[in-house]
Amino acid sequence: MSVSDGPNAASIYMTPLEILKRLAIFEKKFQVFTEQMYVPSMNGNNFSIQDINDEAQKIFKHAGIANYIPKCVFNPHLPSTTAACVDPSYKNFGSITIEINPLHKNNWKSLLAAIAHETCHVVNRYYNIDTEAAKRNDIAEVEILAELCTMYVGFGNLVLRGYGLHNAGGRMGYFENASSYEDAWKIVKMVRFGEDCNFDDPLLKSVMARFKSRKDYVYSPERELTFARIERNVKALKQLLALLEKSNCERYRDYHKKVEDAFKEQSQISSQYRQKPFTALLEFYTKECIDVDDGKVKEEYSTSDEKLAEALAIAIGLMCEVNDASDLSEFRYTPVKCPFCGTLHPYMIENEEKNLKCPECNNIFKADCTHITKKSALAAYRSFIAKIREEGKMDGIHIGYDEGKKGAMEDAIINSNVKFSKEYNEKISSMKSRYQMILVFVAIFGAVLGFILACITG
C-alpha cells in the first residue's frame, strides 16, 4: 500500500456523493477516538529518524491504533512515484514498518502526510473496512478508502498541506482534482468539528446548509413533496372507501330488513302461492315498490355503482397505459365480508357472482368476485378520454362560434377544432411528462368523492 506522487498519481475522480458514501462506512465501522483535528509536533527541516518515529506514534494514537508501534525507514529502492508504503497484513499488535521515499527526507509536510496515509491503511485493515476490496485486488478502492480515512480521523490539514494539491508541478495523492480532498475535509470539519465551510458544488452547498440548520437531517428536494401528497391522498382515499363500505353495509341491511318484513306479512299465504297466484304476484310487486318508494335506492345505488366502477376502471386503465407491464392478476377479490356481521366468508369465489350464507349470522347475501381485466379497464379509460375530448371539442366549438360570429359557421368550427386540438395535445403531453400516478388519484377523487359523500350522508 502506498501514497503515490508525480504525474501519474492523480487518477481518481471523486464526487461528493462518493465521498459521503465512504465517510458513512467509517462511521459504521468504528468510532473516532478524539474530537480534535491532528496538530503535528514536528515542523521545520531539522529532524531525525527518531523525531519521525515519535511523530508517527502520535499519529497512530490519534487514529486509534496506539497499541501498534510504527517503524519508519527510508527505502531508496522505492519508485520515484511512490512516497511511502506499508504492509498492513499483520495479525497481532506489534511493530509496523512504514517505508518512506528518501525524496521526501527533507520535507516534513509531505513526509507526515505520507505517514498519515499509511497509518490509515492500517486503520482500514484493522476495522475490516478495505478487506474485501483488497481480496478482489481493487487497489483503487483500497487507496480511496485510505485517502478519505485521513480526513475522517482528522488528518485533513496534514494531508492538504503535505500533498501540494495546488502545485503547478508534481503533487501527491490519488484523487484527480484538489476539490475532492477539499470537499471531503470541509464535510468532516463541518460535521465533526462544527466549522463553517464554503462549498463550490451547488448541490453540496445546499445539502450542507440544510444539515447545518439541524431542522431536517433528511435531504428532501421539492420533488419529494409530490410523493408525500400521493401518500396522503392514498390514506384519505382508503378512509373514504372504508366509510363508503360502512354506509353500503348499513343500507344493505336496512333494505334487506324492509324486504324481509314485507314477505313476513304475506308469509302464511305465500306458502300457498300455487293456489293463490295473485298473492304471490303481490309479493313480487311489493318488493319492487320498496325499491321505488325507499328514496329511489335502486336508482341511487345503480348510479353510484356505475360511477365507482368508472373511476376504478379509469385509474387502472391509466396505470396500465403508463406502465405496459401492469399485471392485474395480483388483484384479490376474496375473502368476502358478510354485510350483516362483518365475518369473512371461508368460501373462496373465483371470478363469479354467488349467493353466500354467512356461517356466523346465517344471513344470505350476494357476492361479486368477477375479475377486472386489463382490456376492460383500458377500454373504459380510453372511452373516458374520448368523452372528455368530445366535451372539450363542443366547448371549443361554442367558443370559436362566439369569437367568429361575423364569419361563416365553418370557419368557427375549424378555429375551435384547431384551438381545442392544440390545448388538448398540450394538456395530454403535460400529463404524460409529469408524475402519472398523481392523475390516478385525481381521477379517483374527482369521480368518486362527490357520490361517496352523498352516499354517506344519505
Image (cartoon, rainbow, N blue to C red):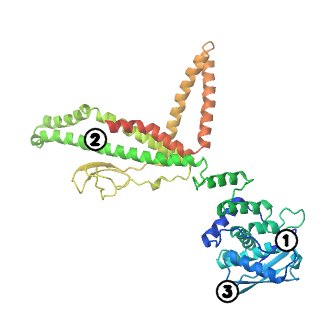
Q: Is residue 162 left or right of residue 146?
A: right
The residue at 66%/66% (across/down) is: 23
Q: Earlier in the sequence, mark 1 or mark 2?
A: 1
- Could you tell me which quadrant the N terminus lies in? bottom right
Q: How far apart, in angstroms, are the residues tagged by discs 1 and 2? A: 83 Å
Pair 1/2: label in front: 1
What amino acid type is highlighted by mark number 2? Answer: Arg
Q: Residue 93, labelled with which disc?
A: 3
The residue under label 1 is: 5
Instruction: Indicate the position of residue 395 as horizontal and vertical percent values.
Output: 54, 24
Instruction: Indicate the position of residue 230 as horizontal and vertical percent values.
Output: 51, 47
Residue in the foreground of this view, choosing between 396 and 202: 202
User: Decide: marks 1, 2 in contact (CB < 8 A)?
Assistant: no
Q: Residue 251, labelled with which disc?
A: 2
Q: Earlier in the sequence, mark 2 or mark 3?
A: 3
What amino acid type is highlighted by mark number 3? Answer: Phe
Question: How many other residues sit within 10 Å of disc 1, few (<14), some (14-19) or many (≥20)?
Answer: many
**Is residue 273 visible from the viewing direction of this image?**
no
Instruction: Indicate the position of residue 373 as horizontal and vertical percent values.
Output: 46, 48
Q: How far apart, in angstroms, are the residues tagged by discs 2 and 3? A: 79 Å
- Kindly state the secondary structure of the residue where label 1 is placed: loop
- Kindly state the secondary structure of the residue where label 2 is placed: helix
What amino acid type is highlighted by mark number 1? Answer: Asp
Above or below for 214 versus 192? above
Q: How far apart, in angstroms, are the residues tagged by discs 3 and 1? A: 30 Å
Q: Is residue 168 left or right of residue 435?
A: right
